């Protein structure tokens, strides 16, 4: 495995783990609101949309943020086999792509929850 693949894998691991903890929090919050299924779906959609915004902002920052101040740098044991002049560009690009990839997933989850909210309200299952 070359340095680029290791950086990509560790970026995926790092961002994916953070998103999984976010997912756990959102789902737990939604489960607490299951007495009001429409409100649970709507609040889940809003929270996923907020997560998408945070990920897009992180993606915008990634190319300029020092790669030595990222979790990926720690995960690869603070060493790489890349030319130092290219390391910042590669770390930034990999992290940007990873953040965008997860932002797309959270946006899809938000859209699904918005549709579920609308379906619940149209079906009359929402408590009045």
Image (cartoon, grey):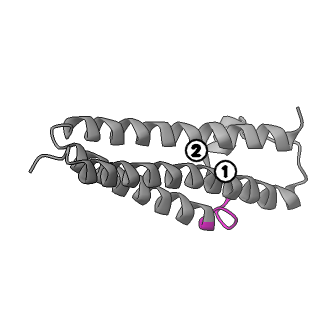
Q: How packed is label 1: few (under 14 Cα within 10 Å), some, or many (20 or more)?
A: many
Q: Which residues are magenta?
A: 60-66
Q: Residue at the spot x=26%, y=48% of the render?
A: 123
Which quadrant, please, contains the N terminus? top right
Q: Residue at the spot x=72%, y=40% of the render?
A: 78
Q: How packed is label 2: few (under 14 Cα within 10 Å), some, or many (20 or more)?
A: some
Query: Tags 1 and 2 in contact by the CB under 8 Å rule?
Result: yes
Can you identify the residue that label 2 sits on?
15
Q: Residue 43 location, x and y as percent? A: 28, 52
Q: Is residue 121 magenta?
A: no
Q: Residue 99 location, x and y as percent? A: 61, 54
Q: Residue 29 location, x and y as percent? A: 26, 40
Q: Residue 109 location, x and y as percent? A: 47, 48
Q: Residue at the spot x=42%, y=58% of the render?
A: 49
The rendered magenta stretch, by its main secondary structure, is classed as loop
Of all residues, the one furthest to the top in this rendering is 1
Q: Earlier in the sequence, mark 1 or mark 2?
A: 2
| Mark count | 2
Can you identify the residue that label 1 sits on?
98
| Left or right: residue 34 compared with residue 64 | left
Q: Element under label 2?
A: helix
Q: Element under label 1?
A: helix
Q: Nearer the viewer, residue 11 or 117?
A: 117
| Left or right: residue 104 compared with residue 47 | right
Q: Nearer the viewer, residue 76 or 44?
A: 44
Q: Nearer the viewer, residue 98 or 42?
A: 42
Instruction: Place residue 122 in its image quadrant.
Output: bottom left
| Left or right: residue 68 compared with residue 36 | right
Of all residues, the one furthest to the front in this rendering is 123
């Amino acid at each position: 495995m070359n340095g680029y693949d290791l950086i990509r894998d560790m970026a995926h691991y790092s961002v994916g783990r953070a998103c999984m903890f976010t997912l756990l929090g959102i789902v737990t919050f939604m489960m607490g609101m299951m007495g009001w299924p429409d409100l649970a779906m709507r609040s889940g959609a809003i929270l996923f949309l907020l997560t998408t915004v945070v990920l897009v902002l992180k993606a915008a920052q990634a190319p300029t943020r020092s790669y030595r101040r990222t979790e990926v740098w720690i995960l690869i044991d603070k060493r790489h086999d890349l030319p130092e002049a290219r390391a910042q560009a590669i770390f930034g690009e990999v992290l940007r792509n990873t953040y965008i990839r997860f932002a797309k997933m959270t946006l899809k989850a938000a859209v699904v929850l918005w549709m579920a909210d609308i379906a619940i309200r149209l079906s009359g299952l929402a408590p009045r």
